[in-house]
Amino acid sequence: MRVLFVHGAFVRDGAWWWQPTADVLAGRGLRSSAVVLPSCEREPLGDLHDDAEAVRALLDASDEPALLVGHSYGGMVITQAGNHPAVHRLVYVTSFLPDAGEALAGFGGSEPAPWHVSHGDGTASVREEFVRPLFAQDFDDPTYAGAAARLTLQNEAVFGQAVTKAAWREVPSTYLVCAEDRATLPETQRRQAGRATDVVELPVAHHPFVTRPELVADVLLQTTT
């Protein structure tokens, strides 16, 4: 069994974000890797479907069964890409869990979130002054500095693109509700989680794989059986 991690929006270097959990998993005999998303880490920037293709390329590289783990926006990606014979289970971490025909923008209100910045050139980013209070309230100073250095532009098209497949309709899934998340509120997560096969709720914030890796690793290890 292997684990493939898919990070959320507006950040690069997925391996850095997932490394604390990857280290715990490695100590327990489970290897992992993080997908590079073209929508925020390639020039020219790709879109949601390019992100899904990047996931499929890693899945195609081995017949070994995989846990496909998506965080926040990453839930859109794994929903599109996860109907693959190598996928053992989908794991959604404070994620969006769309049905076919649904886009990320459809889960929000009529106005953009206050932390969302549209640059008028097809890209968007997050206002850094909102990052720590909403997305990283439990980060210590050195960890937050590392996170802030990895904020990046993203192709704004991904937020309006609908998934064409809903892998969770055919593949078992687990939803990890992060009950102390200030960015994706717990009640929003619980509504999304209603579509998953299983639900786990933990008293953690938006990035538990950074700050509480042992808890996330425990959830992942339980889904390998």
Image (spheres, grey):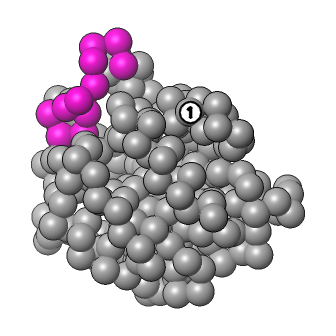
Res 87 → quadrant:
bottom right
Q: Which residue is mark 1?
A: 24
Where 130 sits versus 68, above or below? above
Q: Which residues are magenta?
A: 133-143
Residue depicted at 40% across the width and 43% down the height? 215
In the rendered structure, the answer to whether residue 122 lies left or right of residue 78 reads left
Visible in this render: residue 82?
yes
Residue depicted at 24% across the width and 70% down the height? 190
Q: Is residue 9 magenta?
A: no
Residue depicted at 76% across the width and 63% down the height? 65
- Quarter of the image with the C terminus in it: bottom right
How far from the left and from the top, in percent, is residue 192?
A: 30, 74
Q: Is residue 137 magenta?
A: yes
Depth order, front residue of 177/84? 177
- The crowd level at tag 1 (other Cα within 10 Å; few <14, some 14-19, many 20+) is some
Res 213 → quadrant:
top left
Mark 1 element type:
helix
Visible in this render: residue 36?
no
Where 9 sits versus 177, above or below? above
How far from the left and from the top, in percent, is residue 133?
A: 15, 33
Res 158 → quadrant:
bottom left
In the rendered structure, the answer to whether residue 25 lies left or right of residue 8 reads right
In the rendered structure, the answer to whether residue 222 lies left or right of residue 61 reads left
Where 165 sits versus 10, above or below? below
Where 75 sits versus 142, above or below? below
How far from the left and from the top, in percent, is residue 208?
A: 36, 41
The amino acid at mark 1 is Val
Depth order, front residue of 161/35? 35
How far from the left and from the top, in percent, is residue 185?
A: 17, 58
